[in-house]
């Protein structure tokens, strides 16, 4: 039996292991009293559907100690003490070629105790025949507190506590007697009655409602003009009535509120405390509304709002990336940086929506082959990739720089996941990632210059650069030092994403077999760091992991990719041929055929 952590033979395993599921059909779950009966059934099971039947038989492994193995004699070593030959000769009875670390066995027991089917979310989300997988996953996420502009009421004295200072009661932002004049929400029933007045969370005073209406009218004019132009590549006719219905003031308010509450799930690139809908660029305003509607799924309810949003994806995609290209047509001045940032924010969020249409091959091809490269090209031309913070920067400068840093970091993650899922060669290389990584989320969510100053003075943490982190991690021989124990969760998140580039590049360069042992030990070290980081995270904060809760599954998938790539079954996997594609069909087959319980 091989150790699941270090992949060495387990020294204590003197008897061949009989797997507990050896009498169970892996396809239909039928249970048999004999192993051979179960295997005969599995070979012709009606639910096999062409899937590979993994042979449970294993070759005989020696269990000799180092001394006996060196001269090739029988070794009587057991679970206790030295073997008879070493004991009689006073030799050290060691097993350096085997795993003798009992903590690794504890790791395996911990994995088995979870009782979780690994990679179930990844298996479903890569299946082109299933739909609304991510949307339903978002629907299961808890709702975060609303963030919005500073309250018009006198602020309470700032007291630094354990909880993030990120909540503002929306009712405080509204003048008295205003609620009766609001239009009914057309996405009604999304939240409890006391939460269905989100206007004050984003717009105050009421005169700004008119500004938002004017902004939405400008958006309609620009989208209509783009739909009628030759630069629009979608074949969907622009319907003004349907557009106005979806992008009404009340709908946009509600969608923005939903997006804000689910902002932790993925791509947290909007600084909600200073984000004003009526001041947002038209492309970003459009994508915020679409993302909020996409995140509106609730268990027990239908996906009507998501379906309505999807009808606009093609047109929105064409419009958003047209605006991004237009932003780069002329030299960018300092005054143009905020608009350029919002164009990139809209592009990344739109790319995230595009990838949700797993059954739309045309959209998938465009997202992977054109949209992601266009966004990365824009980040390079705007010189955003190497942005770093300065200790002397004020709050507004910090927000702008941190927004850029988050844009680059999450774009890199998206690029790495495209490499993992579609064998897409990386567009944004690890060697380019020399800028800072995102800061503490509590610092990012500060809603005023005073709160920012107080939090920054009390939460001093060193800045990290991804290129340096990965280089040190690979060259440290996986020593567990305190410097790794203190890494934030997102730093570990983006490091695992970076490993996808390394695995891909080593494989296509035919060096993976030579480096496989090092990679497997590196992945094992990463997993232990991740588990400890999550354990140290307060229980109240673990619910905000978002997509990061699936990282252990991605680590295990990465491990299996390395293991199978250097094994005899590599040629049988379409995914391991490393042919670039625009869908996740190949990796879905790999997960289905080669993944078993950790």
Image: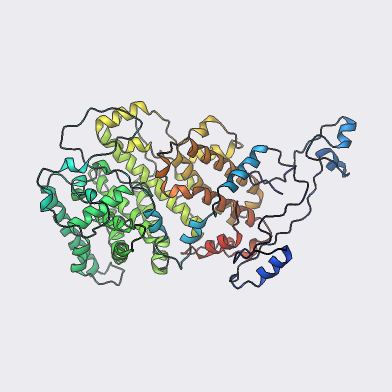
Residue 217 visible, this angle: yes
| Up-down relation of residue 199 to residue 226 (above or below) | above
Q: Residue at x 30, y 43 (%)?
A: 145
| 462 relative position to 74: left or right | left
Which x, y percent locates residue 382? Answer: 33, 47
State how the image is colored: rainbow
Tell me the quarter of the picture where residue 66 sits.
top right
| 530 relative position to 284: left or right | right
Q: Between residues 44 and 442, which one lies in front from this camera angle?
A: 44
| 263 relative position to 484: left or right | left
Q: Between residues 494 and 74, which one lies in front from this camera angle?
A: 74
Q: Residue at x 42, y 68 (%)?
A: 359
Residue 468 visible, this angle: no
| Up-down relation of residue 463 to residue 25 (above or below) | above
Tell me the quarter of the picture where residue 311 sits.
bottom left
For this orientation, the residue located farthest to the right is 88
For this orientation, the residue located farthest to the front is 33
Which x, y percent locates residue 368? Answer: 42, 60
Which x, y percent locates residue 326? Answer: 27, 57
Q: Between residues 36 and 449, which one lies in front from this camera angle?
A: 36
| Up-down relation of residue 370 to residue 140 (above or below) | below
Marker count (numbered):
0
Which x, y percent locates residue 78? Answer: 80, 40
| Up-down relation of residue 220 to residue 60 (above or below) | below
């Amino acid at each position: 039996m091989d150790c699941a952590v270090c992949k060495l033979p387990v020294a204590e395993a003197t008897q061949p292991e009989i797997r507990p599921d050896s009498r169970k059909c892996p396809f239909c779950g039928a249970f048999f009293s004999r192993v051979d009966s179960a295997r005969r059934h599995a070979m012709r099971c009606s639910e096999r559907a062409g899937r590979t039947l993994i042979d449970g038989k294993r070759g005989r492994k020696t269990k000799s100690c180092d001394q006996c193995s060196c001269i090739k004699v029988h070794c009587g070593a057991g679970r206790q003490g030295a073997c008879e030959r070493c004991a009689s000769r006073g030799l050290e009875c060691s097993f350096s070629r085997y795993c003798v670390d009992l903590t690794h066995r504890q790791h395996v027991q911990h994995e088995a105790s979870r009782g979780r089917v690994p990679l179930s979310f990844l298996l479903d989300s890569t299946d082109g025949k299933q739909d609304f997988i991510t949307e339903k996953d978002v629907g299961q996420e808890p709702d975060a507190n609303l963030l919005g502009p500073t309250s018009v009421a006198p602020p309470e004295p700032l007291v630094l506590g354990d909880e993030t200072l990120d909540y503002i009661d929306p009712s405080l932002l509204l003048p008295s007697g205003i609620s009766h004049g609001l239009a009914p929400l057309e996405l009604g029933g999304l939240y409890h009655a006391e939460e269905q007045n989100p206007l004050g969370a984003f717009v105050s005073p009421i005169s700004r409602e008119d500004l938002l209406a004017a902004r939405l009218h400008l958006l309609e004019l620009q989208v209509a003009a783009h739909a009628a132009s030759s630069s629009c590549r979608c074949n969907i006719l622009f319907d003004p009535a349907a557009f106005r219905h979806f992008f009404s003031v009340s709908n946009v308010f509600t969608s923005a509120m939903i997006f804000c509450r689910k902002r932790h799930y993925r791509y947290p690139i909007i600084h909600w405390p200073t984000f004003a809908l009526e001041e947002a660029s038209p492309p970003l305003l459009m994508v915020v509304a679409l993302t909020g509607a996409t995140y509106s799924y609730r268990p027990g309810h239908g996906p009507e709002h998501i379906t309505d949003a999807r009808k606009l994806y093609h047109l929105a995609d064409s419009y958003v990336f047209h605006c991004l290209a237009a932003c780069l047509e002329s030299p960018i001045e300092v005054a143009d940086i905020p608009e350029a940032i919002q164009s990139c924010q809209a592009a990344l969020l739109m790319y995230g929506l595009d990838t949700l249409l797993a059954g739309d091959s045309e959209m998938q091809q465009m997202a992977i082959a054109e949209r992601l490269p266009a966004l990365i090209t824009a980040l390079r031309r705007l010189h955003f990739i190497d942005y770093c913070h300065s200790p002397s920067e004020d709050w507004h400068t910090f927000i702008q720089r941190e927004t850029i840093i988050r844009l680059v970091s999450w774009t890199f993650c998206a690029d790495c996941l495209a490499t993992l899922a579609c064998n897409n060669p990386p567009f944004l290389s690890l060697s380019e990632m020399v800028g800072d990584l995102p800061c503490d989320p509590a610092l990012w969510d500060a809603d005023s210059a005073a709160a920012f100053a107080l939090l920054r003075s009390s939460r001093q943490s060193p800045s990290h650069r991804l290129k340096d982190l990965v280089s040190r991690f690979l060259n440290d021989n996986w020593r567990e030092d305190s410097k790794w124990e203190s890494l934030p969760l997102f730093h570990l998140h983006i490091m695992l994403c970076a490993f996808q580039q390394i695995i891909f590049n080593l494989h296509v360069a035919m060096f993976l077999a030579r480096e496989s042992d090092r990679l497997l030990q590196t992945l094992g070290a990463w997993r232990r760091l991740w588990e400890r980081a999550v354990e140290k995270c307060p229980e109240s904060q673990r619910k905000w992991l978002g997509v990061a809760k699936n990282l252990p599954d991605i680590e295990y998938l990465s491990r299996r990719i390395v293991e199978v790539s250097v094994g005899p079954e590599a040629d049988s996997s379409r995914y391991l041929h490393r042919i670039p594609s625009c869908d996740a069909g190949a990796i879905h087959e790999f997960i289905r055929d080669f993944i078993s319980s950790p």
